[in-house]
Amino acid sequence: LSALQILTRQLRRSSFTHTIECRSRARVPIINCGTRTGFEGDIAIGGHNGVDTSTYAMDQVKRFDSFAPIVLFLKVLMAQQGFDKPFTGGLGSYKLYVLVAYHLERHLANGGMDHPSEVLISLLFRYGCIGSRYDKTTTTDLEWFQKSEDLIHSDGGMCELTPVFRLSDCVDMFRECHARLFDRIDVADDHDEKISYLSCMIDCYRLNEARETSVRRSKLCDDINRPTPRDHPGKVSSGRRIGKVFTKGSGAVQSSLKRGPRGGIVPKKRPDLQAKHSLRNNRDAEIIQRGVKNRKNNKKQKRDEALRSFASRNSI
């Protein structure tokens, strides 16, 4: 944990990162890092790290032609439904890779073809528990694996569903997507025009908006690797303070603004203080002004109770 906290402090100083969150109380402590280009990743020390997940995913891409498009579709679908974060009880990337590879092995063993459309329909049928729960060739009851604390294995990968406390919602999502897909197929048979089958499951407007946001961020980040000059007024890292902002040295730009001992600009006029000082000669007005204050401190509220009653009787 100390290593993660040290790394968190270093990442927060980086110009490339946008959001940094150290989840030290998670089952597997990680650093959730969001970059200025819109990409997000997790950093962990020990357990399954990014290298293990990436290697497993690349091996499955070589094994199955449908692995990459199916995983891409499921990631977009689960991200829009909020089921993609293990920290909130969803399915993480590694578990999703194992589930897709497990289904592809069973799909091909049943005589199916390695085609994305066919694999997607059978995957929604399997993990949506649409068929009989006892027919393990076409249906995999994920909730049974969770209750029995059993593991799902595929090509050396293991998927533990015990910490996925929103698994029932994921199963309902697979079942609903299967129903919507077949409804769209029935509609397509009645019309000659080409329609999108995936649009019945994915919000295309949100997907396009996320793409445009990512493109805008990437265009604004052309200076990510450019070092920050020492005389930049927005410099916040450690080092010599900037002369033209904090000091009045020989190299500083002189200004007519007055600064306090901590570098803050002293305002030329204080209307609030002027109004307060104007009441010093009028004792009754000063008491009324003090009585109308809405104090949050309970001790001060009791102390000024008499003043509030006086102010309520004499104020206009």
Image: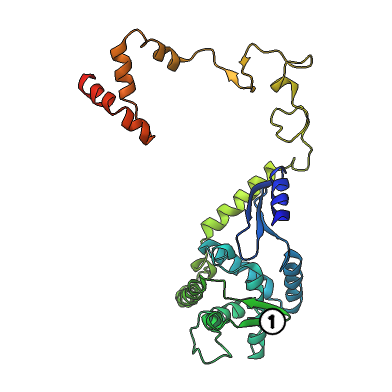
Q: Nearer the viewer, residue 269 or 209?
A: 269
* Mark 1 Cα-neighbour bin, 10 Å: few <14, some 14–19, many ≥20: some
Number of numbered callouts drawn: 1
Q: Which residue is pictured at 44% across the width and 15% down the height?
A: 273
Q: Which residue is pictured at 78% across the width and 39% down the height?
A: 226
Using the rendered view, name the quadrant where residue 146 is placed.
Answer: bottom right
Give percent across and percent down for residue 229: 78, 31
Q: Residue furthest left?
A: 313
The residue beneath circle 1 is 154
Q: Is residue 316 visible?
A: no
Q: Nearer the viewer, residue 253 or 79?
A: 253
Give percent across and percent down for residue 114: 67, 81
Q: In the displayed structure, does residue 206 sit left or right of residue 49?
A: left
Q: In the displayed structure, does residue 295 sit left or right of residue 75?
A: left
Q: Residue furthest top?
A: 281
Viewport quadrant of the C terminus = top left
Viewport quadrant of the N terminus = bottom right
